[in-house]
Image (cartoon, rainbow, N blue to C red):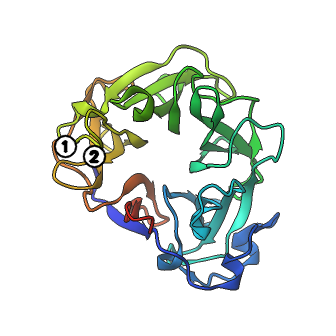
Amino acid sequence: MNKLTTITLAALLLAPLAALHAEVPMRGDDPAQTDVFTINLSDIRVRDPFIVADRASKTYYLYAQCGNRQNNDSLGLGVEVYASKDLVKWSAPRLAFERPKSGFWGGSDIWAPEVHQFGKSYFMFVTFPGRAGGRGTQILRADRPEGPFQILGDSANTPPEEQCLDGTPWIDEHGVHWLVYCNEWTSIKDGTVRAVPMTDDWTARKGESILLFRASEAPWVRPYQPGNFVTDGPFLHRTKSGKLLMIWSSFRNGGEYAVGVAESESGSVKGPWRHSPDVLFGKDGGHGMIFRDFSGNLLFCLHQPNGGNR
């Protein structure tokens, strides 16, 4: 992998800024065009952060569920977005997706929103509870990175028979669209990463899911609880040399929450996946993602610390 620069978004309570303590953030306008960039990165509390480098506007967008900054992940308000020109100073958050108060399957715990541009559209992948089988990932669409994002379909996009979270997209060398996600340890004990083929518009599954790997297969992973192994936050990255890598999170031997790396031996999402024995990041942080800044530097973004509700 190319040398990475790390951006850590500390899960700290925010400083007492009036714009950050409104119960519901403002909607409608692009924060990159309407706000002054006055918030320091170190003052933003985000778990499972995701940054989009929008080259059209030369703006970075950071997505978080609204409860993060209020230290209450069960508020169920939706997903908000911060904007920045330099990754250091950020705008006040704006509402990018408002969770419907009725007629929507997803519950109030909103996890791990991430946004990807395909063609002229932006797609949000976000996890909700609320269905009979447990958590699932829902896909949303918008015309702009700041939203508003609209729900695609009337049910979760991950398989209904599996308790799923942290869905992320991948389009392979043949143009096949894949939804890669975690089948959670809470239902199967040894958590897995799986993939299911999707229609090209990301609205529906078009086949059965396949197993990519189990958490216990990685040599760096320890049980979270006796007999229980965690998979969290998969993210795929194709290197300049053509290698297909996946970063993902679990709990490391002799330590806390960490990020590991797996490489596809075939260069395809189908694998098989070979795990590095060493972690990429092992200091109680995780759920990472990779992006390039406007100078072409490869950056690694994650939240830290993971423990202590900080």
Q: Quadrant of residue 183?
A: top left
Element carrying mark 1:
loop
Along the viewing direction, whichever of 301 and 266 lies nearer the viewer: 301
**Front: mark 1 or 2:** 1
Is residue 80 placed above or below 198 in the rendered structure? below
Mark 2 surroundings: few (<14), some (14-19) or many (≥20) residues within 10 A? many
Residue 44 in view in this figure: yes
Q: How many marks?
A: 2
Residue 57 in view in this figure: no
Q: Which residue is mark 1?
A: 220
Specify the amino acid type for callout 1. Trp
Counting from the top left corner in percent of width and height, residue 51 is at 53, 59
Residue lying at the far top of the rendered structure: 207
Q: Which residue is mark 2?
A: 260
Q: Residue at image x 16%, y 42%? A: 277
Counting from the top left corner in percent of width and height, residue 78 is at 70, 54
Indicate left or right for 309 with 70 as reference: left
Element carrying mark 2:
strand
